[in-house]
Amino acid sequence: MPGDCDDSPMNVEIAPSRVGGRVQAPPSKSYTHRAILAAGYADGATVTDPLVSADTRATMRAVEAYGGSVDRSADDSTLEIEGFDGHPEVPDDVIDCANSGTTMRLVTATGALADGITVLTGDDSLRSRPQGPLLDAIEQLGGRAESTRGNGQAPLVVEGPVDGGPVSIPGDVSSQYITALLMAGAVTDAGIEINLETELKSAPYVQITIEVLSAFGVDAVETDAGFRVEGGQSYAPEGGEYAVPGDFSSMSYLLAAGALAADDELEVRGAQPSAQGDAAIVDVLERMGADIDWNRDRGVITTRRSSLSGIEVGVEDTPDLLPTIAVLGAVADETTTITDCEHVRYKETDRVSAMAEELTAMGASVDEEQDTLTIYGGETDLQGATVDGRADHRIVMSLAVAGLVADGPTTIAGGEHVDVSFPDFFDVFERIGATVTRE
């Protein structure tokens, strides 16, 4: 199918480079996942400007497993989705979510609506990630939800149907549990009332969910105790179509590249305001002293090479920005302290340790604690090195940004993993001026 790529191992060498010009931001992965599944819950819908990547293809396969269909245009600019209209079928086979944690969590709740048993699994990384709170929530709703190994991790077995009701769930492990329950709850009879047992981490991602639900005609609201979605609702976007906005998580690498290595300026388009928490990268760069302008009406952000200073920044709501901020901190003067980051350890890899270790390999001075990452930029001169992308798209892309300003070439193992969220990342990097060699 178009957009699918060779996922064989690839080392990528980044030579010190200057960047500039104009570039279009990739579509949002978070919005694309939700739009695909929302169209699945609907009778059908057209999703325009989607991100077609390894992760979002996993969500497409899940929609098909539940009885829908996904037809991709030749250039991947549209997805014509026939949905299962709020009544998912029992899948004929195990649902393989590959490396996509978002897919697994969102469609595990979908499985709780089916009148039978659904089995879900993924790759080694995904099978190490926590799912226990979501499984417990499904059981509170009267469904069956088990980890086959009894450790709260995939493979998962889910049996429904559930009718809705109240659930209590921690908010500090993953906001994706909340998203999964809200999306499924809209088509139950009773709806779902979510009571948060702890403070919600990554809260902007739930706001993204509420925004997408609203675009599909579904009402979900925040309450004093958590969130609520009424039952008996139908998914139907206005005009039968939904357009995916640009992705600020992916934009962060381009904006950082401009702030660190622009020859003149780098203009990033597709940056319309939305509920995305990772738009905070603009504020982070401004606080560090970057020369950056955001024309919100035009959706254009312009960055210029700047002298940066270290800051303290919390990532409780923006976990995907940690690798980018860590690289900025390694180049900035003085010290950058990234706080509230324990939950960032439960992504595709432990991103706190990964960035600490790989930046150290490049000559950075770094201290790692359970909930804090400190980068001593004033004591750091980045050196080209061979580093491990940890099979994690965000580690790979952030290290590529570091390679632009290191002394000597940087070789990143596992470059193929950018396909998860930004499949043509290295092509874009070359177009803006980076010297990229693929091996």
Image (cartoon, helix red, strand yellow):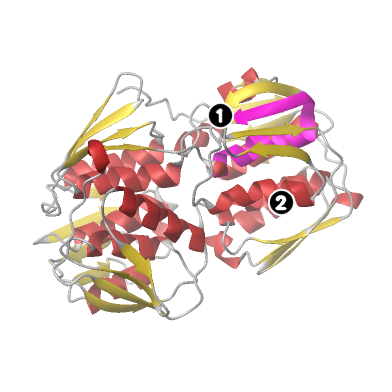
Q: Which residue is mark 1?
A: 425
Q: Which residue is mark 2?
A: 284
In the picture, the disc for residue 395 is none
Q: Is residue 110 left or right of residue 253?
A: left
The residue sitting at 28% across, 58% down in the picture is 183
Q: Is residue 242 left or right of residue 12?
A: left
For the residue marked with disc 1, what is the amino acid? Phe
Q: Secondary structure at mark 2?
A: helix
The residue sitting at 81% across, 34% down in the picture is 406
Q: Secondary structure at mark 1?
A: helix
What is the C-alpha distance between the residues marked 1 and 2? Answer: 22 Å
Query: In the image, residue 9 lies at what x, y percent?
Result: 51, 31
Q: Nearer the viewer, residue 20 or 393?
A: 20
- Image quadrant in which you'd find residue 258: top right
What segment carries the magenta color? 249-268
The residue sitting at 64% across, 20% down in the picture is 430
81 above or below 308?
above
Residue 387 visible in rendering = yes
- Image quadrant in which you'd find residue 253: top right
Most prominent secondary structure in the magenta stretch?
helix
